[in-house]
Image: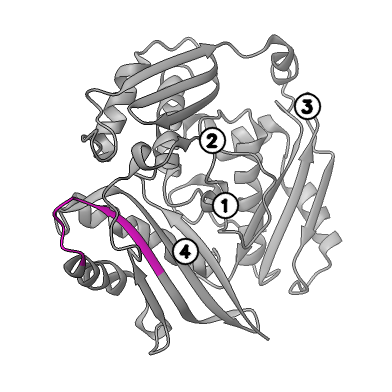
Amino acid sequence: MRYYFTSESVTEGHPDKLCDYISDSILDECLKQDKNSRVAVETFASKDNITIAGQITSNSEFNIEKLTREIIKKIGYDNAKTDIDYRTCNIYTNITKQSSDIALGVDTGGAGDQGMMFGYASNETENYMPYAISVAHRLSQRLTEVRRNGELSYLRPDGKTQVTVEYEDDKPIRIETILISTQHTENADITQLKKDVIEKVINKIVDHNMIDENTKIYINPTGRFVIGGPLGDTGLTGRKIIVDTYGGYSRHGGGAFSGKDPSKVDRSAAYMLRHIAKNIVANGYADKCEIQISYAIGLKEPISINVNTFGTSKRTDNDLVQLIREKFDLTPEGIINYLDLKNIKYTETTNYGHFGKDKLTWEKIITL
């Protein structure tokens, strides 16, 4: 059976990712000073404005506005006429403490909210990620790299990539389409930009064996992308959850990751399920695996676990559920301790996917 599947990624300068990065930077600073910090921070970016709101219960002390300006500068935004200027933009904060009602459950080791989470892995790539999102992430990361190192100095921080893959019998056989939209300076030559992106981005990342004479490549198809960042489109924390996970190839429970400390199972349980699914595949139990788990606020143990190996498992899915229950502590506290989530630098997860990066604890391969 042949079919096509498409996934997208975005650069660190995309307005939603700018917001994710600010939220995760605040989280990192809180945890750096106080490992027991409770953080749930949202960032909203619009023309000349950054708004930060949420709940923080922590013994940490730092200047949120100063940190935010440093992040905007680090990403490369310094022009209010085309995107946003870290020096002159307005920054508003509205931070309160975590609700005492929620703390009642979390303080005793329970889940901080109800909800369901998913984890996924497949053996179609070396990092056990779906092929389309894996390529899209690497293209986005390369866009940022050539901008930062000066190879394509006329690029600006905002950008998006999209990859359509043709599958045969559930295996990626070729790339049907590559789409890249990248912000650029006013005086950039579009013809040269398209040539440069093919040469210095696509050709450096994409396996040439996956491209043929029928592969379509689109670069800045409107012909102009000068206005970007929060000036071109508003940004919001948590609005790129499919980019953050599996590019749509697997289901998602709906909860965002960035700006949340690990007591929030939206984040920590999703990381744990990726770890388990990856190891089910890496240990040869299945070619691909999707796991769903659900929690109730204040309760420690999950209220359901479901495994789907799409008919590729050498054991029954129910057997794998039993294996998971025997091998792993899926309480919030158990997950935090197992993955060392109070000592993670969360800004390392923000961009180019929360999964598939070897240095993250949930990507470690173990023996099951």
Neighbor class of circle 2 (other Cα within 10 Å; few <14, some 14-19, many 20+) is few
Position of the C terminus by quadrant? bottom right
Q: Position of residue 2 (x, y in %)?
A: 63, 85
Q: Position of residue 22 (x, y in %)?
A: 40, 30
| Residue at numbered disc 3 | 297
| Residue at numbered disc 2 | 340
Residue 187 in the magenta stretch? The answer is yes
Q: Between 332 and 66, which is closer to the camera in this rendering?
A: 66
Relative placement, left or right, of 53 versus 367 is left
| Residue at numbered disc 1 | 242
Q: Nearer the viewer, mark 4 or mark 2?
A: 4
- Whole-angstrom CA distance, mark 3 to mark 1, is 24 Å
Q: Position of residue 299 (x, y in %)?
A: 80, 27
- Whole-angstrom CA distance, mark 3 to mark 2, is 22 Å
Indicate the amino acid at tag 2.
Asp
Disc 2, SS: loop
